[in-house]
Amino acid sequence: MARLAAVPARHARFVEDKHLAALATPIEARGELVYRRPSHLEKITIAPAPERLVVDGTALRFEHDGRVETFDLVSRPELAALVEAVRGTLAGDLAGLSASYAVALAGDEGAWRLSLTPRSVALARLLRLVAVEGHGAEPEQIDIIEADGDTARMRITPLP
């Protein structure tokens, strides 16, 4: 976690496969991730359709289909906890992650896995597990398993 916390900014490509029970084939999305300390996170989806999710502090902005939706994460604790699973991992914020999740770390610097299991009943109704795998200070994959069984796997490749 200390090595993750030492990285002031990240810029990466992502490929995300979402497996939804309602669909016969997974949905693949591609784009870029941007993280800047202390609390800025962007997920810029290029395909299949342009979208932009920007989180700064407790403000979340979602742009899609020419519309902009904004949320205050303070008033949406389950959404805040999901955002923190990613942002808190990138920030190396063990204390912040531990507030919402039971945290388990396995492996070593060569290959590690961070498992986040929701602490609250309300969050567990939405989310079963977030697992982040990587090496050194580089997260390489994020798996999200929702309570209904839908899954998402995001593979991350750092950009220079």
Image: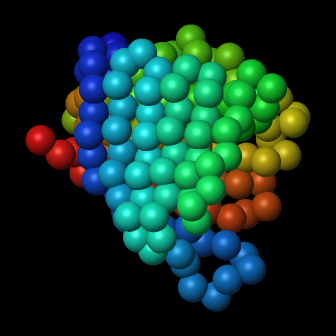
From the viewer's perspective, is 86 left or right of 90? right
Residue at 45% across, 74% down: 48
Along the line of sight, the residue nearer the viewer: 145 or 25? 25
Of all residues shown, which one is farthest toward the front?
Answer: 66
Residue 39 image offset from top left, x and y in percent: 47, 21
Q: Is residue 13 visible?
A: yes
Along the line of sight, the residue nearer the viewer: 90 or 49? 49
Residue at 44% across, 47% down: 43
Quadrant of the rendered image containing residue 3: top left
Quadrant of the rendered image containing residue 129: top right
**Residue 106 vertical position relative to residue 6 in the rendered view, above or below:** below
Residue at 26% across, 21% down: 7
From the viewer's perspective, is 24 left or right of 107? right
Q: Is residue 141 visible?
A: no
Along the line of sight, the residue nearer the viewer: 107 or 59? 59
Colour theme = rainbow
**Which quadrant: the N terminus?**
top left
Of all residues shown, which one is farthest toward the bottom?
Answer: 24
Residue 67 image offset from top left, x and y in percent: 62, 56
Residue at 48% across, 51% down: 52
In the rendered picture of this protein, how many numbered marks are placed on residues? 0
**Residue 123 vertical position relative to residue 90 in the rendered view, above or below:** below
From the viewer's perspective, is 152 left or right of 138? right
**Which quadrant: the C terminus?**
top left
Residue 124 image offset from top left, x and y in percent: 80, 41
